[in-house]
């Protein structure tokens, strides 16, 4: 009698375990990340070392790399003349799909430094600092001082800097001008579901300037002096293709080695295979159920029915 009761109990436990396992399998899902990559072209800019660049008798403007989430149209302004050139930021605009955003917002940004006696100091720098939502503007980066070690006395101070309305670029020199984010919009095609959710390989849609989803311009105003006639440069771009990659394909990297000329030490740098100076990207996460989810769910229901019958 005891052995029979024990056998029935174990049988019930096995049935319960079977049902729980089936339900678990039915509810299994994975989250993948989709990388949407945008190629950028221009009809009035030339190719220079893989980058887009504009040049006239006064200056050369180079868009060194747009590769960032949402894009980045920061640029290098090089003064080719023997005179100082002044950039009029209050008369310069980033224009996306016909909507203009001001380069000059009359804002202030600040940085804080810490001084500590008897401690070691390290410095950390970023290319760009604060990211604001007004059109997606990148503000100038700051250098922060990090103090570590045993310190008896410590103090900190902050410096507030006003955004310049005029930027002077000295003769035969250059300056980096923080730009805007290009677009944070994730494009979906209502007529092509395979494009929206790539299965094994990437999917691409190509565009001309006339039907591009994103057309943007940099309108830059400059002069030789504050009383001279203002000149204008209008650099225009458009998204020429949109490609969707699944996370495994999108985050594939290759390693490159660089050797320091003094210490001869080699450092490895990883570069995404889908990145490019004339490209930018956006991402989104997508949850997928396993193919056997429906079958497992049916098995779970049947198993639950069997368990209930055997319990009662």
Image: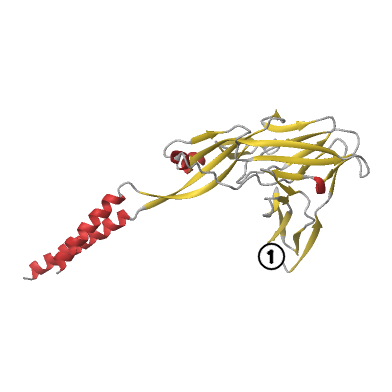
Instruction: Assign the N terminus to one quadrant of the image.
Output: bottom left
Residue shown at the point (12%, 65%) measured from the top left: 8
Judge whether 46 appears above or below 72 on screen.
above
Using the rendered view, name the quadrant where residue 303 is placed.
Answer: bottom left
Residue shown at the point (82%, 38%) measured from the top left: 232
Q: Which residue is mark 1?
A: 150
Judge whether 71 appears above or below 240 on screen.
below
Residue shown at the point (26%, 60%) measured from the top left: 20
Q: Is residue 252 visible?
A: no
Judge whether 19 appears above or below 141 on screen.
below
Residue lying farthest left? Answer: 1
Relative to 119, 296 lies left or right: left
Residue lying farthest right? Answer: 227
Relative to 309, 300 lies left or right: right
Using the rendered view, name the quadrant where residue 94 is placed.
Answer: top right
Q: Position of residue 63 (x, y in %)?
A: 71, 37
167 or 118: nearer the viewer? 167
Instruction: Assign the C terminus to one quadrant of the image.
Output: bottom left
At numbered mark 1, what does the secondary structure look like: helix, strand or loop? loop
Q: Position of residue 231 (x, y in %)?
A: 85, 38
172 or 119: nearer the viewer? 172
Relative to 60, 270 lies left or right: left
Residue shown at the point (80%, 56%) measured from the top left: 106
């Amino acid at each position: 009698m005891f052995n029979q009761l024990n056998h029935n109990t174990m049988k019930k436990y096995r049935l319960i375990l079977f049902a729980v396992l089936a339900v678990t399998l039915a509810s299994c899902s994975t989250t993948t990340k989709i990388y949407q990559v945008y190629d950028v072209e221009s009809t009035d800019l030339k190719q220079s070392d893989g980058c887009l660049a504009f040049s006239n008798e006064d200056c050369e403007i180079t868009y060194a790399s747009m590769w960032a989430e949402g894009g980045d149209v920061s640029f290098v302004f090089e003064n080719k003349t023997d005179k100082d050139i002044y950039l009029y930021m209050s008369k310069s605009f980033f224009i996306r799909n016909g909507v203009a955003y001001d380069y000059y917002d009359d804002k202030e940004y600040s940085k804080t430094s810490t001084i500590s006696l008897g401690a070691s100091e390290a410095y950390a720098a970023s290319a760009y600092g604060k990211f604001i939502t007004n059109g997606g503007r990148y503000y100038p980066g700051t250098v922060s001082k990090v103090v570590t070690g045993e310190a008896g006395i410590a103090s900190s101070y902050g410096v507030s800097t006003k955004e310049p309305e005029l930027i002077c670029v000295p003769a035969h020199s250059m300056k980096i001008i923080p730009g805007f984010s290009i677009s944070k919009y994730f494009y979906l095609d209502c007529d092509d579901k395979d494009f929206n959710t790539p299965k094994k390989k990437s999917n691409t849609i190509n565009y001309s300037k006339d039907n591009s989803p994103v057309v943007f311009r940099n309108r830059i105003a400059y002069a030789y002096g504050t009383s001279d006639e203002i000149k204008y440069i209008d650099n225009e771009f458009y998204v020429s293709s949109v490609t969707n990659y699944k996370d495994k394909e999108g985050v594939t990297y290759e390693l490159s080695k660089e050797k320091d000329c003094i210490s001869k030490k080699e450092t490895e740098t990883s570069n995404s295979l889908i990145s490019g100076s004339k490209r930018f990207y956006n991402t989104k996460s997508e949850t997928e159920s396993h193919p056997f989810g429906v079958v497992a769910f049916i098995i779970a229901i049947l198993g639950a029915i069997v368990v209930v019958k055997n319990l009662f």
